[in-house]
Amino acid sequence: MKNEITEKAKNILKKHGIQPSVQRIKILEYLLINRTHPSADEIYRSLSAELPTLSKTTVYNTIETLVEKGIIKPLNIDSRELRVDAIIEPHAHFRCMECGKIYDVEIEMPDYINKKVGDGHLVKAQDLYLEGICNSCLKKSERK
């Protein structure tokens, strides 16, 4: 399984004209495996033991490149830090106001891409962010 993910990461990078360095492969692998909407710091902390030469700058630069090429998507759901998502198809996100976790949410999303809204504004991107209390935190508060 790990080799399949490594090959997938290499192929994605090559397909988008990005040199598949060890660091880039590992960062993209991490994003493909961990669907937790991580921040750059979380990626760095998770990979630094395995890649002692990895720097935060490399993580930030790689994220920037992957976003520019449309491989991953930035999430602006948390005002404190940028998070990223390897699922680039339109879908909703839910952020728990208690624990801060971000979840993918399966709900019907209207498609406004390349459609005009309001006074003729052309939509080029859309995101749906929901906030509330996640199921885990609700259960914890019910036990108190």
Image (cartoon, grey):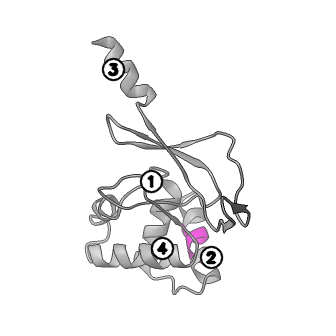
Residue 89 position within the rendered picture, expressed as x and y whole percent measured from the top left: 65, 58
Label ID, residue 25: 4
Write the start and end of the magenta stretch as one range. Answer: 6-11
Using the image, determine if residue 35 lies above or below residue 43: above
Toward the front, the furthest residue is 119
Q: CA distance from mark 2 to mark 1?
A: 22 Å
Q: Which of label 3 and label 4 is nearer to you?
A: 3
Q: Earlier in the sequence, mark 3 or mark 2?
A: 2
**Left or right relative to 80: residue 104:** right
Please state, as top left, top right, bottom left or bottom right, where the C terminus lies in the image: top left
Residue 10 is inside the magenta segment:
yes
Quadrant of the rendered structure where residue 30 is? bottom left
Q: CA distance from mark 3 to mark 2?
A: 43 Å
Q: Earlier in the sequence, mark 1 or mark 4?
A: 4
Label ID, residue 140: 3
Label ID, residue 37: 1
Q: Which residue is labeled 2 in the image?
A: 11
Residue 5 is inside the magenta segment:
no
Residue 17 position within the rendered picture, expressed as x and y whole percent measured from the top left: 59, 87
Toward the top, the furthest residue is 143
Residue 73 position within the rendered picture, expressed as x and y whole percent measured from the top left: 52, 64
Q: Amino acid at mark 1?
A: His
Q: CA distance from mark 1 to mark 3?
A: 23 Å
| Along the viewing direction, whichever of 101 and 29 lies nearer the viewer | 101
Q: CA distance from mark 3 to mark 4?
A: 38 Å
| Along the viewing direction, whichever of 15 and 3 lies nearer the viewer | 15
Q: Amino acid at mark 3?
A: Lys
Residue 120 position within the rendered picture, expressed as x and y whole percent measured from the top left: 69, 66
